[in-house]
Amino acid sequence: MKDHIDKKNKKANRLIKLKSPYLLQHAYNPVDWKDAR
C-alpha cells in the first residue's frame, strides 16, 4: 500500500470536504464514496 498519494494527477471525490482523518485518506480513491450521514 502506498504511504502517499500523487494528488496532482488525481481528482478528489466528495470525501475531501469532510474532517475525518480516516475518510480524508480515501478522498482520492477512484470511487465516489459518500459518508453515511
Image: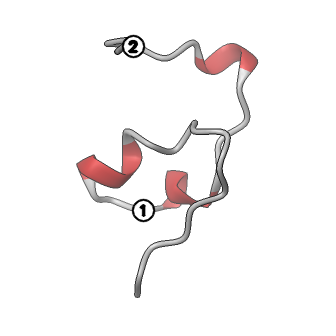
Say whether residue 5 is left or right of residue 13.
Answer: left
Residue 9 appears at what percent x and percent y?
74, 16
Image point 26% across, 49% down: which residue?
Answer: 22
Q: Quadrant of residue 14?
A: bottom right
Q: Rounded to the nearest whole Å, what is the CA distance between mark 2 and mark 1?
A: 19 Å
| Amino acid of disc 1 | Leu
Q: Is residue 29 above or below residue 33?
A: above
Which image quarter is the C terminus in?
A: bottom left
The mark closer to the camera, 2 or 1, is: 2
Q: Mark 1 points at which residue?
A: 18
In the rendering, at what x and y percent does residue 5 appear? 49, 17
Q: Tell me whether circle 2 and circle 1 mark residues in contact (CB < 8 Å).
A: no
Q: Which residue is drawn at 34% across and 15% down?
A: 1
Task: For mark 2, give the secondary structure.
Answer: loop
Q: How many labels does the image show?
A: 2
Looking at the rendered structure, the kind of residue marked 2 is His
Q: Quadrant of residue 29?
A: top right
| Residue sitting at x 57%, y 12% | 6
